[in-house]
Amino acid sequence: MGVCSSGPQYPGPDLPYGGNYPFVGKTYSLSVKVKELFSGVEQADPGLLDWAELILQPNGSFRRPDEQGDVFPLSGISIKWKFDQKMGQLWFDFFQGDEQMTSRYDILKAKEKEDKEPDFTAWDAEGYDGSNSFQFTLKEVETKTSKGVWECC
C-alpha cells in the first residue's frame, strides 16, 4: 500500500491506498448517470476498458471478475482506491505513470441502511475531472461460488 501525495487541486485525504474492509473482494457493477456530454463520455469508458464490473483489491488496485491480476496500469494510467473511515468515503485517485492527476478523482459514499450503518452493497459517487463532474453508482452483483451457490448483497 502506497501513500498518496496531495496536490494543489486535490481535496482528498492523505491516506494509504488499499486495506481490508468489508467491500474488498466483492464484485461491483458500475453505472454512470448520463446528464450531458461529459457524463456520456464517462459512461463509455467502462465498456471500452472492459471493467463494467470490478473488484477492489487489498493492495489499492482493481481487478476484473475471473482474473487474478490487477487491471492497472493500463496504457500508463492507474487508478488506486483508499477509504476514509472517519468521513465514510471511498476515493478513486488517478495516476499517469507515478504522477497523481490531482484534478481527476472520484468520491464514493456508501448508502445507509435503516440503522444508519453504511451499506457497502451500494455506493453513490461523483467523479471529477477539472471543472467537469459526473455521477455514477457502484452496486454489488450476485456472484456464483465454486460450489455453485449464488452470493450477493
Image (spheres, rainbow, N blue to C red):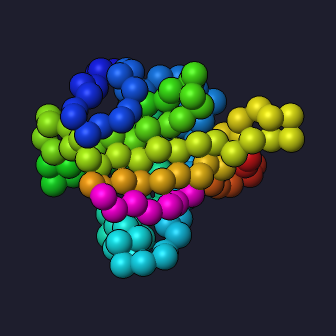
- Location of residue 87 in the rendering, given as x and y in whole percent from the top left corner: 57, 28
- Location of residue 33 in the rendering, given as x and y in whole percent from the top left corner: 53, 69
Rendered view: 105 above or below 60: below
Picture residue at 24% right of the left edge, 25% below the top: 5
Picture residue at 50% right of the left edge, 37% below the top: 90
**Which quadrant is the N terminus positioned in?**
top left
Magenta residues span 131-137
66 left or right, relative to 77: right
Magenta includes 136?
Answer: yes
Residue, far right: 114
Q: Is residue 64 visible?
A: no
Picture residue at 64% right of the left edge, 42% below the top: 110
36 left or right, relative to 87: left
Count of marks placed on residues: 0
Rendered view: 97 above or below 50: above
Prevailing SS of the magenta stretch: strand
